[in-house]
Amino acid sequence: MSDQDAAGASPQGVHLFDRVADQVVAAVGDDDLKPGDRLPSERAMAQRFQVSRAVIREAIRTLCERGLLEARPKSGVYVKEQDGKGASAQIGMLLKRHIHAFGELGEVRFTLEVDIAGLAAERATPEEIATLEETIVNMETHSDDGEIFTENDFLFHITMAKAAHNLLYLALIEPIQDLLMSYRVHSYHHQRELTIAAALHHHRRILDTIKARNPEAARQAMREHLSEAQGVLAQTE
């Protein structure tokens, strides 16, 4: 059997390399393999999983693309320390394929960001609060520059997610915010004054509640922000 055949589908229609990749993921989840651990050689893995080395190479390539493994030249393949970026990228691909309306994004965003705001009020560091303040100042200073304005709008929400100090929230909200960028840019150019005024007002209010360490007020401020933003952005759909 050729390497191509060996890396292909099993009689059950499941790619062998996918099955091997799933088993490696399970080993990481069970702590048999930990971040920083080097994987065994291709030969050893092929013997362990009873597949060809071509299958092992394809499984490793797949897991490197997912961000679980890292190939280091002249060193080997290692389990990566997970920072949420791999999961975030996977979620982003899923969203792009299956979410077809702004309303669906808005529903998910609302559920996540209201709680994120509350947690940020409890957990934000002084440095994170300073970064939030900086994004607002940048939006005020560059309100006539759509690229800078919308980029700092994006950074405000991402920084707040980081300030919640929950990796899963960040992994979930980052791809949603990425997808919202096109709506932000369109809204800025077609409803400029309303977009600028609403964003600055609500961001300032949210930041004030975070500074005050008032989680419920932060959640309410975010609810009001998203409710208004949903209306404004929906008009650009």
Image (cartoon, helix red, strand yellow):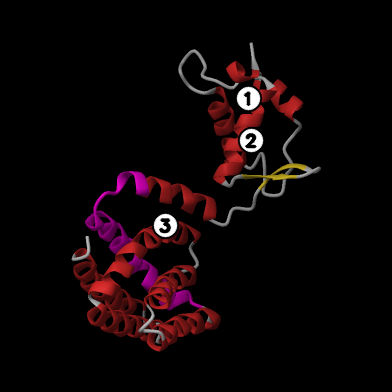
Q: Quadrant of residue 52?
A: top right
Please tell me the numbered disc located at residue 60: 2
Screen quadrant of the N terminus: top right
Q: Nearer the viewer, residue 204 or 73?
A: 73
Q: Are marks 1 and 2 in contact (CB under 8 Å)?
A: no
Mark earlier in primary sequence (1, 3): 1
Q: Is residue 36 visible?
A: yes
Query: Where is 125 relative to 98, above or below?
Result: below
Mark earlier in primary sequence (3, 2): 2
Screen quadrant of the C terminus: bottom left
SS assignment at label 1: helix
The residue located at (46%, 61%) in the rendering is: 170
The residue range painted magenta reads 96-124
Q: Are marks 3 and 2 in contact (CB under 8 Å)?
A: no
Please state which amino acid type lies under the numbered disc 1. Answer: Val
Q: Which residue position holds label 3?
A: 175
Q: Which residue position holds label 1?
A: 55
Query: Where is 129 relative to 71, above or below?
Result: below
Please state which amino acid type lies under the numbered disc 2. Answer: Ile
Residue 124 % position (x, y): 48, 77
Query: Where is 181 relative to 141, above or below?
Result: above
Q: Nearer the viewer, residue 152 or 227?
A: 152
The residue located at (34%, 63%) in the rendering is: 182
Mark earlier in primary sequence (1, 2): 1
Q: Quadrant of residue 196?
A: bottom left
Please state which amino acid type lies under the numbered disc 3. Answer: Pro
SS assignment at label 2: helix
113 falls in the magenta region = yes
SS assignment at label 3: helix
Query: Where is 174 relative to 92, above or below?
Result: below
